[in-house]
Amino acid sequence: MDLLLWITIGFIIIGFVVLASMKKGMEGKLAFITANMEDEESSTKAKSIIWWIVSTTILGVVSMILIVWWFHNHFG
């Protein structure tokens, strides 16, 4: 197994661990936002949820790129 595969696996595992550890906090923020729609703090919490969704999307895209890159280098 080569270095690119280990980097890919490590990136995916670390990313999932970080996202899973943040999940409960994001659920709490979402519950706060739905309960207090007009609170000014809701805007700040909404922005953090949006950034969490963006980072999750980026993690998925980069993971797919790394997997395709590994397959291209290994089998191509």
Image (spheres, rainbow, N blue to C red):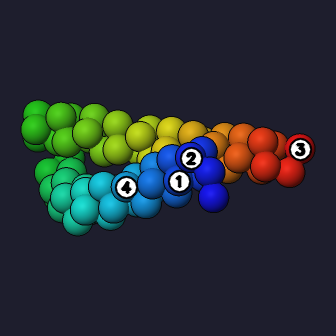
| SS for callout 3 | loop
In the rendered image, which residue does mark 2 sit on? 3
Q: Which amino acid is tagged 3?
A: Gly
Q: Nearer the viewer, mark 4 or mark 2?
A: 2
In this picture, residue 6 sits left or right of residue 40: right
In the rendered image, which residue does mark 1 sit on? 6
Report, in whole angstroms, how far the alpha carbon at label 3 lies from the one at label 4: 27 Å
In this picture, residue 38 sits left or right of residue 21: left
In the rendered image, which residue does mark 4 sit on? 14
Q: Are marks 1 and 2 in contact (CB under 8 Å)?
A: yes
Point out residue 9 in the picture as x, y percentages from the top left corner: 52, 57
In this picture, residue 40 sits left or right of residue 11: left
Q: Residue at x 46, y 49 (%)?
A: 11
In the image shown, does 1 or 22 lie closer to the viewer?
1
Quick one: label 4, few (<14), some, or many (20+) residues within 10 Å? few
In the rendered image, which residue does mark 3 sit on? 76
